[in-house]
Structures are given as C-alpha cells and as structure tokens.
Amino acid sequence: METPKFKSSLPDFVIAVALAAAFALLATFGIYTLYPMPASPFEPSTEAECIAVGGQWVPDPTDDYYSYCDWIGSDYEDYYAALDTAYFGMSVLGTLIGLLAVCLGLFCIKKKAVASGLLFGGLIVLFWTALATWFVGPVPVIGLAVAFIAVIVAAYNKK
C-alpha cells in the first residue's frame, strides 16, 4: 500500500505566522503612536521637595531608596482623566482594527496563508486590546467575542 503524498504547507504556515506577527506589531505600535500616554505629573523625590508641596515624607528604615512622599496633588486628577481618555481611544481603535482584520481574513481574502495571517493577527490585536485596556469598559471584550463568533460561524458554514 502506498502512502499518500501531501503538499507541504510549511511555507504557507510560515507566511501566516509572519503576517500575523507583523500585523499585530504594526497595529499595536500604531495605536500607541496615535494615542500616546500622558506624561505623569511631578513626583517629589526628596524630603525637601515633599515638604515644599505639602506632603509627608515616609522614610524606609532599611533603605533610603524605598522612601517616598505621601502626597496626591490636583495634577493627578487631570493625569488620570487624560489616561482614561487615551486608554478608551486605544480600546476602540484596537477593537476596530482587530475586527476588520478578522473579517478580511474570514470573508474577503482567498489566499489561505494571507487570510490565516490576517485572521490570527486580528485576534492577537483584539486579545492585546482586551488585556491592555480591560478597565475602561467592555468595548474590547465585546469585539473579541464578536470575532470568535465570526470565526465559529465561518468554520461551521465551510463544512
């Protein structure tokens, strides 16, 4: 009995993995470029600076490196508001980019290696967005759920 000969799919697999990694890196670094993190406010680092801004210096008895200033200024409210805005924008943009890549990979592109790369790159972006911005709302988690449902529906319809 002769063993069946299969066409090697290693090059397609390598193309898909490389495309997924490149797409995920490009998308995530692009999102960080569009939504840069706000600069953190002034943090007193010496006892004199701490007392000057009205804080209380808390020394560490074992190591001066771990001493800190117990002080929360009004700058922090503005900082956290700007941080929430940046994270929300990142979550919406990451969800849209991830869902677009998943849809392109599932429904629009016919070459299997490219379609698989875009599909898995989009899932990586959605997963990264859900992990990086989970505390700003359900947008990335809903996007991830929609993507998984689309993958399951597409796989079921191809049978």
Image (cartoon, rainbow, N blue to C red):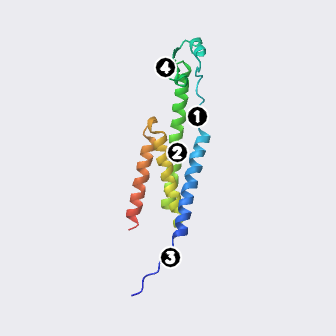
Circle number at residue 37: 1
> In the depicted view, which residue is nearer to us: 110 or 9?
9
Question: Which residue position holds label 2?
Answer: 94
Which residue type does callout 1 highlight?
A: Met
Q: Earlier in the sequence, mark 4 or mark 2?
A: 4
Residue 42 lies, with reference to residue 35, above or below; the image says above
Question: Which residue position holds label 3?
Answer: 7
Which of label 2 and label 3 is nearer to you? 3
Circle number at residue 3: none
Q: Residues within 10 Å of mark 4 (few under 14, many from 20)?
A: few
Circle number at residue 61: 4
Q: Quadrant of the C terminus?
A: bottom left
Which of label 4 and label 3 is nearer to you? 4
Q: Earlier in the sequence, mark 3 or mark 1?
A: 3
Q: Residues within 10 Å of mark 1 (few under 14, many from 20)?
A: some
Which residue type does callout 3 highlight?
A: Lys
Q: Going 42% across and 86% down the picture, which residue do you hit?
A: 2
Residue 2 lies, with reference to residue 138, above or below; the image says below
Q: Secondary structure at mark 4?
A: loop
3D distance between C-alphas at marks 4 and 2: 45 Å
Q: Earlier in the sequence, mark 1 or mark 4?
A: 1
Q: Earlier in the sequence, mark 4 or mark 3?
A: 3
